[in-house]
């Protein structure tokens, strides 16, 4: 087990009151397991993904992530802001539905940004090779606004895996794409998951990823 | 329509910070308009109302001082010459020694012009003035003065100028000038069209160089009263300068409203498209936005009026704010505010207007350069000088700023700092500059004005202090000193020299002048910045006299002192006299001149260690005289200087504040759009501190670019203020001093303001997205 979610709940302010978006959710994810979180709109898929990625903190419950080659689990709840930030920077890659790239950096620069932040400059060549394999070699110096939606998502995947994180999270990565591009993006995510041995968790409506996923978590 | 208004209202209150910023920006601009209008109106009217000459429009001086000259003129007028003149009074003027000072006395024949608009407000006073050999005293500073027995005071009246008014016979008697008449004052039959404009913008007729038409009569010189009274022109110029500065706040505010409306339209573009799709017309959408602008301006006017009233009362600038003036000022603010807001909204909607073709742009630049040249070389009016400032600002808006933004846009993507974070910062700044072009322009305009004003005031201050240092050497001045005996003072221990100054009023061909007679020796030459030459005899005149007479060193000056035939003396030096409202002529002292003037001042040069002792002794010996140390006078003069420019600095600061709010608004809109970018960077591992640092760096870069943009325009404005506005408005010249400290202050202010205006929205956005 590498991800352990125990009785996690999260509420948000709603008008004058509060609304529980996630209530008492528990599950485990095994090493190198591709997992899909599914459910209808508004059920809390994105919130759950953000909780696992340490982007927000739960109101109740515990989330533990265990790193490869480490016997000790890291409880995200117990990390302070700085530690959480460092953990996220070093070990997590994230792909959003849209706005995945820094608009003022070129494609190449966007991909190199995580390497600069994690001081893993030695991965530079691999990261650039990956861009080439993703068919973005002619767009290396283009800004995100100059790319199509599919190209932007491919670049986003290249950026998310550039520093070779142990966890790769994707929130509706194909929500904005047509069927052909969606399939391509899912395949890329799967390939990177396979190649790097990362733990992939995807929140999606799409059925296409189901073919790749080893496990599906349904939220209702 | 009601649903649309409701939707607009909800949208407005859903962004309270934007709403408050927009309201604050309008309130500040309207506050500036109201304060400037009331202050300048009061300033002008303090000088214009009161003196009897304000009811007359032309002056005919009689060089021979004979009553017969006046009667001949009157006869010609009765015979039909000068048909445009409807009233005429004979005048005699001179100086009376009262309380050791030379006080001007004006004697007019009240019976000659029964329809005179100069109103003593009391028929009885008028009768008493004619029949009882009395005078009316104008000016608060004479209230506690003891008048000689031969002067019967009928009444004391408050006035900005100090003088005595008497019936002509009484005046002739008191001045010992029986049967003499100096001039005739003439009243014109029509109120010029431009006079009503004074109510809208005090000082505008001075600024535009308006004057009544020239009238002529063979053998006689007819001068305009405005020219005859330089103080009125002086305060008119101050009022005009302040009025234009006040307008700057509205101009900057206009840019902000425009920018804010464009942002709002862009933000709600999709919503407006949907509304149009379901049948809402463009006119309806525009009407709702115009209604919103109207509501904002109306509420701002109300707040600004209250603030202005409180400010004016608190700062004792105006003790009694006249209701009508205040109403006019508020209405002016309302009209200007409404026009600015409506133009802003309409322009924001008319997108095709925002895209200007190259041809139009080139034609615009050519026309603006022509306007600049016209303002500098082709016209000598004050409005010409401001036309040049306006042209510079237009060039800044249409040519310089867009060119620099384009250059940065083309150059910066090629500039690749090693750090990716630096690349983000540089490019984001460039993007901000492009997107918030109008807020950037408004901000750089405001900073440029602040630079221009600060440099001009700094230059004037430098020259003024230099002038004070030489004009006021270590020594003591004894004022109202006619009773003091220089011979006795000379014998006191520690006294090195006692210098005598005889003062009074005289007439030049262009009007009245202050006259000072003293020994024009090496000492005096040093005080007035003249390289002394014992062989040259003549007069010193201030720059105002030289400019108005268009005279140079070497030209002859014709001066007329009371009861004397005009004297001709060459001008040997033109001296600076900053802050001096009047014309000043310095005559070499001799018996003839001094008999016509009052010796009311002594300058006592003392050994440095004896200053206090001599000061004490003077106070004890001459208790009715005023003893002033030159160091004290210098400090007082600098204090008055700083106070005079306090309002100017305040208006410039208001313009900067309005621009800062604009920058804040645009930064707020952009930070909203950047929320997604911050989320992404946070996911990638940027801490809040790192994000703040980034926002701070981008803001600082934006501030630096804005400040750099404003430097050339600021220096240009300062040059025009020094080289054109001051000589044209006040007839004095200033050398432009580009002191780094003086330039640094507005730049630092601009930089800090830009950083603050851009960083604060980041804090709001990051708090709301927590």
Image: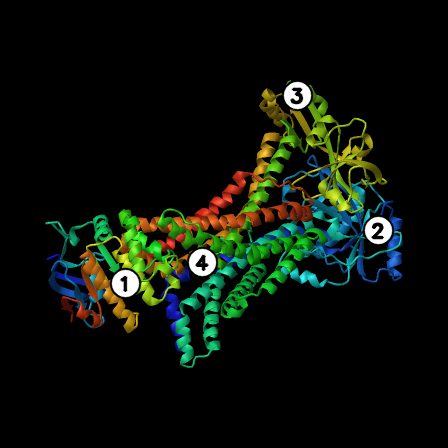
What colouring style does the render use?
Answer: rainbow
Left/right of residue B308 with respect to residue A179 in the rendered view? right
How many circles with numbers are drawn on the protein? 4
Q: Mark 2–mark 4 contact, CB under 8 Å?
A: no
Q: Mark 1–mark 2 contact, CB under 8 Å?
A: no
Left/right of residue B649 with respect to residue B166 in the rendered view? left
Left/right of residue B254 with respect to residue B153 in the rendered view? left
Q: Are marks 3 and 1 on the same chain?
A: no
The residue beneath circle 3 is: B495
Nearest the eye: B86 or B150: B86
Q: Residues within 10 Å of mark 2 (few under 14, many from 20)?
A: some
Secondary structure under tag 1 reads loop
Q: Residues within 10 Å of mark 3 (few under 14, many from 20)?
A: some
Secondary structure under tag 2 reads loop
- In this rendering, which labeled residue sits more in front, label 4 or label 3? 4
Tell me which chain the residue with mark 2 is part of: B
Tell me which chain the residue with mark 1 is part of: A
Spatial separation of the CA atoms under disc 1 and disc 4:
39 Å
Q: Residues within 10 Å of mark 4 (few under 14, many from 20)?
A: some
- In this rendering, which labeled residue sits more in front, label 3 or label 2? 2
Location of the N terminus of chain B (image quadrant): bottom left
Q: Are marks 3 and 2 on the same chain?
A: yes
The residue beneath circle 2 is: B221
Residue depicted at 61% across the width and 56% down the height: B390
Among numbered discs 2 and 4, the one appearing first in the sequence: 4
Spatial separation of the CA atoms under disc 1 and disc 2:
88 Å
Spatial separation of the CA atoms under disc 3 and disc 1:
90 Å
The residue beneath circle 1 is: A96
Which quadrant would residue B322 be assigned to in this image? bottom right
């Amino acid at each position: 087990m590498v991800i352990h979610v125990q009785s996690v709940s999260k509420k948000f302010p709603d008008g004058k009151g509060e609304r529980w978006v996630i209530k008492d959710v528990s599950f485990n994810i095994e090493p190198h397991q591709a997992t899909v979180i599914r459910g209808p709109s508004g059920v809390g898929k994105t919130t759950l993904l953000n909780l696992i990625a340490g982007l927000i903190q739960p109101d109740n419950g515990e989330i533990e992530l265990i790193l490869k080659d480490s016997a000790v689990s890291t409880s995200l709840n117990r990390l302070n802001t700085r530690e959480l930030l460092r953990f996220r920077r070093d070990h997590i890659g994230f792909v959003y539905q849209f706005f995945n790239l820094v608009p003022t950096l070129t494609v190449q620069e966007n991909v190199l940004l995580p390497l600069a932040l994690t001081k893993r400059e030695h991965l530079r060549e691999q990261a650039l090779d990956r861009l080439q394999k993703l068919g973005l070699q002619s767009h290396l110096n283009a800004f995100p606004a100059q790319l199509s939606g599919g190209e932007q998502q491919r670049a986003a995947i290249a950026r998310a895996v550039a520093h070779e994180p142990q966890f790769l999270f994707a929130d509706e990565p194909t929500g904005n794409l047509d069927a052909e591009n969606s399939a391509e993006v899912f395949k890329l995510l799967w390939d990177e998951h396979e190649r790097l041995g990362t733990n992939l968790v995807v929140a999606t409506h799409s059925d296409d990823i189901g073919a790749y996923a080893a496990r599906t978590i349904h939220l209702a | 329509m009601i649903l649309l208004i409701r939707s607009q209202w909800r949208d407005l209150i859903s962004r309270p910070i934007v709403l408050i910023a927009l309201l604050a920006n309008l309130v500040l601009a309207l506050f500036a308009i109201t304060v400037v209008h009331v202050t300048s109106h009061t300033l002008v009217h303090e000088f214009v109302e009161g003196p009897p000459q304000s009811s007359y429009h032309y002056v005919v001086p009689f060089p021979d001082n004979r009553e017969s000259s006046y009667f001949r003129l009157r006869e010609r007028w009765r015979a039909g010459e000068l048909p445009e003149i409807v009233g005429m009074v004979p005048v005699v003027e001179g100086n009376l020694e009262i309380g050791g000072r030379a006080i001007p006395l004006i004697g007019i024949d009240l019976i000659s012009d029964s329809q005179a608009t100069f109103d003593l407000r009391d028929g009885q006073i008028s009768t008493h003035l004619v029949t009882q050999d009395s005078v009316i005293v104008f000016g608060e500073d004479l209230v506690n003065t003891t008048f000689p027995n031969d002067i019967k005071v009928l009444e004391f009246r408050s006035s900005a100028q100090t003088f005595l008014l008497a019936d002509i016979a009484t005046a002739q008697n008191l001045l010992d000038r029986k049967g003499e008449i100096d001039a005739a004052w003439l009243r014109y039959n029509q109120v010029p069209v431009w006079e009503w404009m004074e109510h809208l913008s005090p000082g505008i007729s001075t600024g535009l160089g308006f004057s009544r038409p020239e009238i002529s009569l063979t053998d006689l010189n007819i001068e305009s009263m405005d020219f005859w009274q330089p103080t009125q022109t002086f305060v008119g110029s101050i009022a005009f300068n302040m009025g234009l500065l006040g307008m700057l706040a509205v101009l900057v505010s206009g840019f902000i409203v425009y920018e804010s409306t464009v942002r709002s339209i862009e933000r709600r573009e999709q919503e407006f498209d949907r509304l149009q799709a379901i049948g809402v017309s463009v006119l309806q959408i525009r009407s709702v936005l115009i209604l919103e602008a109207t509501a904002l301006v109306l509420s701002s006017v109300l707040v600004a009026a209250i603030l202005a009233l409180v400010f004016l009362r608190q700062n004792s600038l105006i003790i009694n704010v006249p209701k009508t003036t205040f109403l006019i000022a508020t209405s002016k603010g309302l009209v200007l505010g409404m026009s600015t807001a409506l133009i802003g909204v309409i322009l924001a909607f008319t997108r095709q207007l925002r895209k200007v073709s190259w041809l139009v742009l080139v034609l615009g630049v050519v026309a603006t350069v022509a306007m600049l040249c016209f303002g500098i070389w082709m016209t000598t009016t004050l409005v010409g000088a401001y036309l040049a400032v306006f042209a510079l600002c237009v060039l800044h808006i249409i040519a310089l700023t867009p060119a620099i933004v384009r250059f940065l846009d083309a150059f910066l993507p090629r500039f690749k700092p090693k750090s990716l974070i630096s690349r983000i910062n540089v490019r984001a700044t460039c993007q901000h500059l492009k997107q918030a072009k109008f807020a950037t322009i408004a901000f750089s305009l405001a900073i440029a004005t602040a630079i221009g004003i600060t440099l001009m005031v700094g230059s004037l201050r430098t020259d003024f202090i230099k002038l004070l240092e030489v004009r006021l050497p270590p020594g003591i001045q004894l004022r109202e000193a006619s009773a003091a005996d220089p011979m006795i003072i000379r014998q006191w221990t520690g006294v090195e020299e006692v210098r005598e100054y005889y003062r009074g009023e005289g007439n030049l061909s262009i009007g009245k002048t202050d006259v000072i007679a003293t020994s024009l020796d090496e000492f005096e030459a040093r005080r007035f910045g003249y390289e002394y030459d014992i062989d040259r005899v003549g007069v010193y005149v201030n720059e105002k006299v030289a400019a108005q007479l268009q005279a140079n060193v070497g030209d002859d000056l014709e001066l007329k002192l009371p009861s004397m035939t005009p004297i001709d003396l060459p001008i040997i030096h033109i001296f600076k006299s900053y802050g001096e409202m009047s014309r000043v002529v310095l005559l070499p002292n001799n018996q003839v001149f001094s008999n016509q003037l009052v010796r009311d001042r002594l300058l006592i040069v003392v050994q440095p260690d004896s200053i206090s002792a001599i000061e004490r002794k003077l106070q004890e010996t001459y208790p009715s005289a005023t003893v002033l140390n030159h160091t004290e006078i210098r400090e007082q003069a600098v204090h008055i200087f700083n106070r005079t420019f306090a309002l100017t600095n305040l208006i410039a600061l208001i313009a900067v504040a309005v621009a800062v709010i604009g920058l804040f608004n645009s930064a707020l809109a952009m930070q909203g759009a950047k929320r997604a970018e911050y989320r992404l960077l946070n996911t990638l591992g940027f801490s809040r501190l790192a994000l703040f640092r980034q926002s701070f760096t981008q803001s600082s870069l934006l501030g630096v670019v804005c400040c750099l943009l404003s430097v050339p325009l600021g220096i240009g404005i300062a040059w025009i203020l020094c080289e054109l506005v001051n000589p044209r408005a006040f007839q004095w010249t200033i050398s432009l001093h580009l002191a780094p400290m003086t330039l640094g202050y507005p730049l630092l202010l601009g930089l800090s303001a830009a950083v603050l205006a851009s960083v604060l929205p980041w804090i709001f956005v990051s708090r709301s997205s927590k």
